[in-house]
Amino acid sequence: MEARDADSGTFGEVLYEISSGNSQSAFVIDPPRTGIVKTTVPLDREIQDLYRLEVRAYNPGTRHRFSTAMVRIQVVDVNDNAPFFPTYNPLFIREGFYTQSSSHSFLNFLTFFFTFFLD
Ligand SMILES: [Ca+2]
Ligand SMILES: [Ca+2]
């Protein structure tokens, strides 16, 4: 981030801070003169994929002279999760039953089975 100030000397110096939208304090501008937005923690798209930071530029010694800008940060996905099976309740199948090659037929049978025998 870079803001400009037409004043001279210290009146024209600019400091930066994140004034809102910094959930979990995931970002910081440090040192505040740089305007460089850094991450403080590894970002995880599966937890939060979008941040909207309000960054404020102000003169040292006073916060009366300031401007704000919105920074939109989109976290891009990477393949950091392996496939997993969720926990299922036990499935009871009557002995003598055999499955056919089509899983679709198997699911149809299960639907029939539970509808007929469990209702
Ligand atoms: Ca100024
Ligand atoms: Ca991912």
Image (tube, helix red, strand yellow):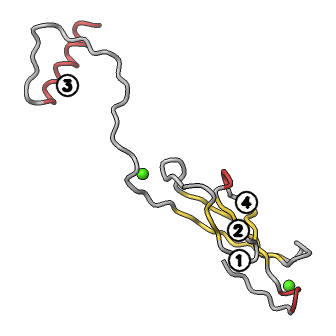
Q: Residues within 10 Å of mark 1 (few under 14, many from 20)?
A: few
Residue drawn at 79 percent across, 80 percent down: 14
Residue on which disc 3 sits? 107
Q: Are marks 3 and 4 in contact (CB under 8 Å)?
A: no
**Mark drawn on residue 29:** 2
Q: Residue 49 placed where, x, y %?
A: 52, 55
Q: Earlier in the sequence, mark 1 or mark 2?
A: 2
Look at discs 3 and 4 and give the one toward the viewer. Answer: 4
Residue on which disc 4 sits? 20
Amino acid tagged 2: Ile
Q: Earlier in the sequence, mark 3 or mark 2?
A: 2
Amino acid tagged 1: Thr
Look at discs 4 and 2 and give the one toward the viewer. Answer: 2
Q: Earlier in the sequence, mark 4 or mark 2?
A: 4
Q: Are marks 1 and 2 in contact (CB under 8 Å)?
A: yes
Q: Residues within 10 Å of mark 3 (few under 14, many from 20)?
A: few
Which residue occupies the foreground of this view, 99 or 61? Answer: 61
Which residue occupies the foreground of this view, 106 or 36? Answer: 36
